[in-house]
Amino acid sequence: MKVTSYLKPQTGGFAFTPENEEKAKGYIARYPEGRQASAVIWLLYLAQKQNGGHLTDEVVEYVAWYLEMAPIRVHEVVSFYTMLYTEPVGEHVIQVCRTTSCWLRGSDEITRACLEATGVERLGGSSADGRFTVVEVECLGACCNAPMFQVGDGDYYEDLTPDSARRVIEALKRGERPAPGSQTGRLSSLNEDGPTTLKDTFPQKAKGTAGGAAGKADKSEGAGDAAG
Amino acid sequence: MPKLTVNGREIEVPAGITVLQACELAGAEIPRFCYHERLSIAGNCRMCLVEMERAPKPIASCAMPVADGMVINTDTEKVKKARNGVMEFLLINHPLDCPICDQGGECDLQDQSMAYGYDRSRFHENKRAVTEKYMGPLIKTIMTRCIQCTRCVRFATEIAGVEDLGLVNRGEHAEITTLEKAIDSELSGNLVDVCPVGALTSAPYAFAARPWELKKTPSIDVMDAVGSNIRVDARGRQVMRVLPRLHEDVNEEWIHDKTRHACDGLARQRLDKPYVRGLDGKLRPARWEEAFEAIAQRLEGADPKRVAAIAGDLCDAESMVALKDFLGGLGSPNLDCRQDGAKVGDGPRFSYLFNTTIAGIEQADAVLIVGANPRHEAALVNARLRKRFLASGLPVGVVGEPVDLTFETRHLGNDPKALAELAEGRGAFAEILEKAEKPMLILGSGAVARPDGAAVHALCLKIAERYGLVGEAAPEGWNGFNLLQRAASRVGGLDLGFLPGPGGLDTAGILAAASKGEMDLVWLLGADELDMAQLGSAFVVYQGHHGDAGAHRADVILPGAAYTEKNATYVNTEGRVQLGRLAVFPPGEAREDWTILRALSERVGARLPYDNLGDLRRRLIETAPGFARLDQVAAAPWEPLPDSAGTELSSAPFTLPIDNFYMTDPISRASATMAKCAEAFVLPKQAATGTEG
């Protein structure tokens, strides 16, 4: 129920571009009439993209006004979700997973490699050239291909080693988009040593080292399917 | 009605309540922090865990609806351990600063950790610290103490209707914030009450007293006509603070900021001895005998028609009946308790009461507000309207200045023309009123104080009749016609007939006569909201408690008692008679007001026939039998009024009588806290709209 109307923010000149306005209307239309506030995360994500990767107070207030919400309610959402940034971020945001599976498989080293390769001084910071931001996040749901990081909106780079992590970053630096997915070339999250069942359906892989934590042999042949 | 077993005892409870409420009905105490009867359920403190049979783990009783056949245990070892554990978690980040915390001694966390907590902590890391937030001049924040129950967020959003508070960040970094904005609500003081810990405390009361040092006196508020039930906490001769007292039909458990924080005005600008204006035109302190002598000289041989009395907004019924009898003894018919010049009051009782009653608002299904801003004139009536709005989407039409009432309103026009249209059944809102089962109309006291107030009043009565707010068309027992008074003394004065007698003058008449020099003596009983320049050369006696406008003009000042300093009766806007009680004694030589009049009456040879409060109350009941029914609202029957064709409706737009909520009477004008509030909330708005000065 509409209780109070909020004034259009006095500060700043942020407004959705016509294309984004169109999209915003589409998001709002997904919810029943009067429940437009449900679209707040979609709109914030849209606004964040339009604003170059992060949200300022005026953008937040614009979204609040757009959805007829109290600004504080939108600030609550923004501060809760880690994928909504309130500080400027680099062109590529690298989110290194650090939850149990990845951590056991060496995510600390991946983080260190990412920081070194990008020139970012501390976690959560950005590189001097403004191209990279490195953050640690909790589980991104790719445990079977640990360790991994995510770049930008949904490019998962999995089965990383410090070397392959560096390689991905160097490619990003050159302006390329390295193929997402397993960096060891395995298909999705199939057994590293090749299938044990359905052997006819999936090709038999070259022999890897026998299981365990040591089984991180870097295989360079063939880029697997994107896991995303 | 579901039946459940609590601690082995079977109990039948109303459907739809929670397990926590059911346990309370069964007599089992459940500790809680985030749960509050009047707020939505959050379920985030986990303190109310109880054991439910067939549930794998303890349940949060505040968020679990009752169901038939539930078996609840609140005193098992498992529950005890659960409470222990929750308490230990809550205290992980709570500082051990009780000795310097203002909540100490009345802190839910303190009490419950004593009752349900563990005697040590296993947390050896550093506690977190949170920066203080700015919430305006009334609320002091020590956010490190916050346990994130979000009661304050829910209060601000749901009851006060200002969405300024929120919980930002997550996990260990969660904190309550306002984004550095003062909470612009008349009800903000209640945030301090709902906070179960010492995170939000009263800024004016900071480090002033400990609860166990205070003498607590139940009393009645006089800052508006709602008659909020309050508790006056005093130490020695000083009122330290005012807190709300529960009264479901009046203020629930809230009070507004003026009620709560104007009490520091009781220690400032006080009249603590009699004064008499000397020949040099200066007021000088005098003894009571001198002051009485000066008045007696004036009264001796004076023409009673040239003597008048006006009662102010904070007067108790006792002093008004004494003054009325005193003037009656002198033979003067010139008295009026309507210092704002309201044109109603001499008609039947229903015509000046809030007949629907405040609790009755919760049945209304359409409201028309005429020339009033209930948010400022009766903040708790507004809170009820909001409650009803949230529950049912109550349509509210406003005639008069458009104001933000914290809920959705439809503006129907600025002037009486919009009313006239409604009376003829035109306009979109007419349809809503037509269809409504229990519509109500709230007429502002400012609207009936206009020169055409009587005509506005008559027109509103006509609307009330037309749309079945009153009379036979209304549902049984429903009276939808309401005059929203804003002075605590008004209904009492009108009930007592503190009104011009036959051939007597009303406020405007008294002032007009005085400015023409036709008044010998004007008695101001706490009347300060008059244009004192109009009193001309009349001899003015001011009886009251604060050195305000009236005292500045007075020739004799008789120091009286403020509302916290006397046993007195007040009648609220509904017509509810309530007793205020003495919390501290009046300062210096000041006396309870009726005793002053009693003493003077003896001196001038017209002795008032009561020597004690009991006698006076008997006289009060004799004058108006309604005073015998304490804390009851007797329905004032509706009757058709004769057409008052005398006055013409003017086309002037309605204006609001209160432009500065924080300073409306001598007490709040003397309060430093209220001055700070006015500076924080009122001045910026006036500057923005250019209405300053």
Image (cartoon, grey):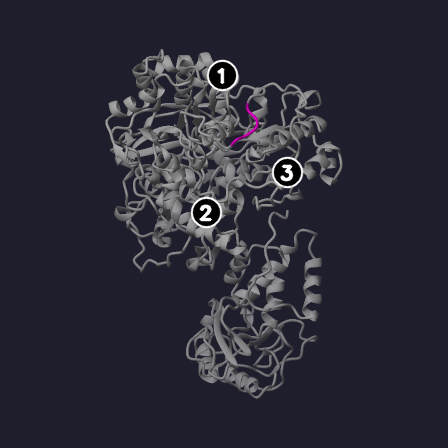
Q: Secondary structure at mark 1?
A: helix
Which residue occupies the foreground of this view, A191 or B202?
B202
Q: Is residue B674 magenta?
A: no
Task: Confirm whether circles 1 and 3 share one chain.
Answer: yes
Q: Is residue A57 rendered to the left or right of residue B209?
A: right
Q: Residue at x 64, y 43 (%)?
A: B414
| Badge 1 or badge 3: first in the primary sequence | 3
Pinpoint the chain carrying mark 1: B
Pinpoint the chain carrying mark 3: B
Q: Is residue B655 rendered to the left or right of residue B248?
A: right
**Residue B412 found in image quarter:** top right
The residue range painted magenta reads B341-345
Pinpoint the chain carrying mark 2: B
Which residue occupies the foreground of this view, B363 or B289?
B289
Q: Are marks 1 and 2 in contact (CB under 8 Å)?
A: no
Q: Which residue is mark 2?
A: B152
Residue B211: x and y, percent?
29, 37
Residue A140: x and y, percent?
54, 68
Q: Secondary structure at mark 3?
A: helix
**Residue B459 found in image quarter:** top right
Name, please, the residue furthest toward the bottom.
A174
Q: Residue at x 45, y 11 (%)?
A: B622
Q: Which residue is mark 1?
A: B626
Foreground tag (1 vs 3): 1
Q: Which residue is mark 3?
A: B392
Residue B291: x and y, percent?
28, 25
**Label 2 neighbour load within 10 Å: few <14, some 14-19, many 20+:** many
Q: CA distance from mark 2 to mark 3?
A: 24 Å
Q: Amino acid at mark 2?
A: Cys
Residue B669: x and y, percent?
39, 41
Which residue occupies the foreground of this view, B229 or B467?
B467
